[in-house]
Image: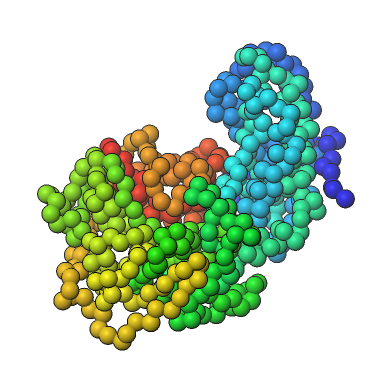
Amino acid sequence: MTKNLNTTNSTFIVPYKQDNNYKHNNKNRILIMKAHFELKNILQDINGESYESYKSIKGEFLFNDYILYVDHVQEDAFSSPSNMRVKIAQSVALFPDDTYSNRSREVALRDFITRKFYESIQTYCEADIDLKESGPISIENPGQEILERSTAFIDQSYVEIRFTLRLPCSGNNVEGDLAEDIIFNKLRKIISNSLLFENLDKEALYQHIKTYEDADFLRNELENLRLIAFVAEGSILPRRSDNSSLPMESDRAIPFISPNNLKMDVELPNMGQITGLGIPRGITFILGSDSNARSTLLNAIAEGIYNHIPGDGREYVVSNPNSVKIGAEIGRNVKSVNISAFCSNIEDSISFSTENADFATSRAANIVEAVEVGADVLLLDDNTDTYIEKAAGLFNEYMVSSIIAAVELDKYYDIANYVIQINHNKALDMALEAKDRSINNLFDSAIGPIAERIPLEESIDSSEIDLSSIEHIVSDSQKHAISEAVEYAKKYMDGKKSFRQVCSLVMLDIGRVGLDVLNPKLSGNYAEFRKLELAAAINRLKTLKVE
């Protein structure tokens, strides 16, 4: 039986903890807030008035089983929608401690709640609202990746959900009756269906949590196992199409089969023992005449920096968290990057700058910038001769491993530490002869020093950010968070700190406080990102200046 929320009147004085992201500003205080019926009265009073009358609903409203916070009211019907939050006490929500008993489980539960809130919106709020004139309750639709987001929070006291509401209107006049129906009827059903443990699918919830926890454990084990990636036996790596992250249909997909020479077992806390392909540190080639098969495996490894939902097919495909897929980015801005190891024939390659990089220079800049801020693994698709010749130098000088998808080894046989032959998702053994793989006599593999550039605060214009070509961004909420982080990073740009130092300090603050640290205004529109993407965003600013 579905548990329903009580909407009867309640006391107006409530002690609660004001706790942005539950990690800072934890000061107990007493707030006097309005009762829910006062919000209803306001909506009835302003019905038919000009849109700006909606500003009178800003505030905190006490319902019997939850508190509604109207944090921001949109200026007009065409502005960004209004920001709202709901906090519901654990005495009502009743989530067991073991659903958020560690960091992995907490993040997974918050993601699960966000997904259920989104699904409930589609059930209770989408069907009968005219999207052209009035917008519904909304929250980002999570994809296949499980991300830490600023949409939902949980601790022993409260569950919180953040969402937006495009307040309804007719022309420029308030539709108070419709707003009342959304807030008092539809929202209540959405909350009941997504924020109460009793009403959730327990089996699905625990599977979500345990899958995420196992993937975190597996990724953390890579370092101990001296691996840079792991692909579980039986994984479904192909996607439905190039533009879809959904798994290929089961009647078409071929489960992944590991090569015997790199096959290994790993014991997970929930799933138990799994078998799969372990890719060690060094230089690994993925070979095969089928470019789709090569790219599918490489892309799955690249996506392994994220955990995936149950049923995705890549639940136990994980990679080093500092892995970066490298490609060309024609037309990008480059500022004072030493690309001489890869493009020695280019004028001023030691401190190369351009507002319109070509194929070779953009790819070289992407490589050097990634290494500059701490990439551990670089992934490249198809033969890239100049890079391959330098792969040994990157590993020997900077301990940066490479995974390269190629048709054949040809003259680069002596560079490879490991070779995987892929054929229809079956990885075959490619035994390498015991030989000296030093390539010093074959190629000039030296990289030389990679200067740690210093970004200058006065050159940072976050309004000019273009994130469209940055690999590994899978969510609009990541884009919003990175844009805010670029602006936030300026506080550490003192003319002395390098890119790596600035970005590391930003990530340290996020790790300590949460994504809310990026802006004093609470937002449910942020998702986790890495310092690698933050640095990539700053590097692409056309206004950027460095020392």
**Residue at left offset 37%, top offset 52%:** 503
Q: Residue 267, percent across and down? A: 59, 78
Q: Picture coordinates of residue 332 (x, y %)?
A: 29, 43
Q: Identify which residue, 528 or 381, lies in the foreground.
A: 381
State the image quarter where residue 155 is shown: bottom right
378 or 87, nearer to the observer: 378
Which residue is found at the position 49% from the left and 56% from the top?
A: 511
- Which x, y percent locates residue 114? 65, 47
Q: How many marks?
A: 0
Report the colour scheme: rainbow
| Residue 73 visible, this angle | yes
Q: Left or right of 123: which side holds 391?
A: left
Does residue 512 sit above or below 405 in this rendering? above
Q: Up-down: is 12 above or below 131?
A: below
| 209 to the left or right of 487 | right
Placement of 205 over or under 149, stated as above or below: below
Extreme-right residue of the structure: 1
* Front-most of residues 87 and 217: 217
Question: What is the x, y in percent for residue 415?
Answer: 27, 74
The residue most toward the bottom is: 434
Residue 102 makes an appearance in the image: no
Name the residue: 74% across, 39% down: 123
Would you identify the image quadrant in which residue 312 lies? bottom right
Nearest the viewer among 48 and 355 is 355
| Quarter occupied by residue 367 | bottom left
Picture residue at 21% right of the left edge, 42% below the top? 354
